[in-house]
Amino acid sequence: MKKVFISFCALIAIVSCSDKKDGFTIAGTLTGDLENDTKVFLRKMGEERQLVDVDTALVQNGKFTFTGEAGAPELQYVFVDKLPGNMVVIIEDGEIQLSAQKDSLGLAKLEGTPQNELFSDYMEESLAISQRAQSVQGDLQSAAMKKDTVLINSLRDEMMELQEEYKNFELDYIKDNPTGLISVLLIDRAMASRMVATEKIQELYDGLSPEIKETTIAKDIFKNLEALKAKDENAKNTAVGAKAPNFSAPTPSGEELALNDALGKITLVDFWAAWCKPCRAENPNIVKVYKKYHEKGLNIIGVSLDKKAEDWKKAIEDDGLTWNHVSNIAYFDDAIAKLYNVDAIPAAFLLDENGVIVAKNLRGPALEQKVAELLQ
C-alpha cells in the first residue's frame, strides 16, 4: 500500500511552460528553534539520478532566500543542514513563498506562483487520503494482533477502496488541471507504474494544453507512449495462440538463420545470455529435454542477448548447447527481443509445427511435461 501513497519527492521532471526570463525568488520561512547561519541547500536531480547542489543560503531569524534565473520550470528540493527530509519546490518565474516547521519539512506550504500553488493544492488533497490510509493501516495491524478476522477483512476492503479512490483522485486531478506541471508528473508516474491502461494514458496526454505538451517531460511522455503502444502490440503478437513473429539473425558462424527455417514439430525459442545466471542454471535441463526429444521432433533456437560474441560462443560450448543459435550481440536492444517483448531473461516460447505459440516461459519439469504432451 505504501507504493500507492508515495511522496512526490521521488518524482523528477523538467518542464517549460513560460518564455519569461524574470527570474525567481524563494522566500523561505522555517519555524522552530533553528540557529542563525544554519545552511540551507537548493538541490536538483542530476543526469545520473543523483542530487546535486544548485545554491546555498543561510538562515537568519528563521528566514532564508534563494534567487536566480528560472529558465524552464523545474522540480527542485530544499534541504536544511542536519534536519531530516526536504521541501519540494517548482522553480519558475516569480516570487515563491516556502514555509515549513523544521521537524516536518515534507509538509512545507508553497504559495506565490501558479505551478507551486497547483502543486501545493495537490499535496494537500493527497495528504488527506494518505492520512486516512495510515489510520486504516494502524487499525489493521491492531486487528491482526488480536486475530480479529472479521475486522481484518473489513479493513482490507476499506484499504482497497481507498487505493481506488486515490487512483481516481489523481486521474481526475490531471483532467482538471491540463496546464499544470503536476499533471505531467502524474501522467509520467502512472505510465511508469503500469497501473493505468495505455489507452487511458493516451487520453490524459491528449487532454494536456498545447503549451504543456511542449515541455521536456511531456515530449518524453509522448515518445514513451509510442514505445509503450508498440510494446503492447508486440505483446498481443506473442500471446499464447498467436503466430510467432518470424525473425532472422546471425549464427555463431556468421550465417543468417530464420525462425521459419528452424521449425520442427515443436520448437523452443529460448532467450538467454552467457551473463545470465538463471539462464545458465536452466541450460542443463534444456539439454536433457533436447537430447530426449530432438529425434521425435523438438527443435530449439537460442536467441542470445549477449554483449560480446566471444562470451556467447564460449557459453554455447561450455554448456553443450548443440542446437541452433542466433544473436545480434545487442543486449536488450536486440530487435528480436523487442519483437517478442522480452525485457527480462530467461524467457522462452514454445511453438507448434505451424509456428503458433502454445506455451511461454516453461522451465524445469514443466518444460519436459509440455514437450512430451505435444509430441505424443
Image (spheres, grey):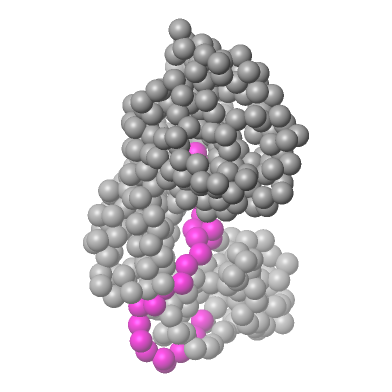
Residue 326, above or below 31: above
102 relative position to 174: left or right: right
* Coordinates of residue 366 in the picture (x, y in percent): 55, 16
Front residue of this view, candidates 111 and 221:
221
**Can you see residue 334?**
yes
**Can you see residue 133?**
no
Q: Residue furthest right?
A: 318
Q: Which residues are magenta?
A: 1-26
Residue drawn at point x = 43 percent, y = 26 percent: 351
Front residue of this view, candidates 205 and 341:
341
* Coordinates of residue 70 in the picture (x, y in percent): 47, 85
Residue drawn at point x = 52 percent, y = 50 percent: 334
179 relative position to 99: left or right: left
Residue 149, above or below 42: above
Asked if the stretch drawn in magenta spans residue 73, the answer is no
Dividing the picture into quadrants, the one containing residue 339 is: top left
Residue drawn at point x = 46 percent, y = 24 percent: 264
Q: Main secondary structure of the magenta part?
A: loop
Quadrant in which the C terminus is drawn: top left
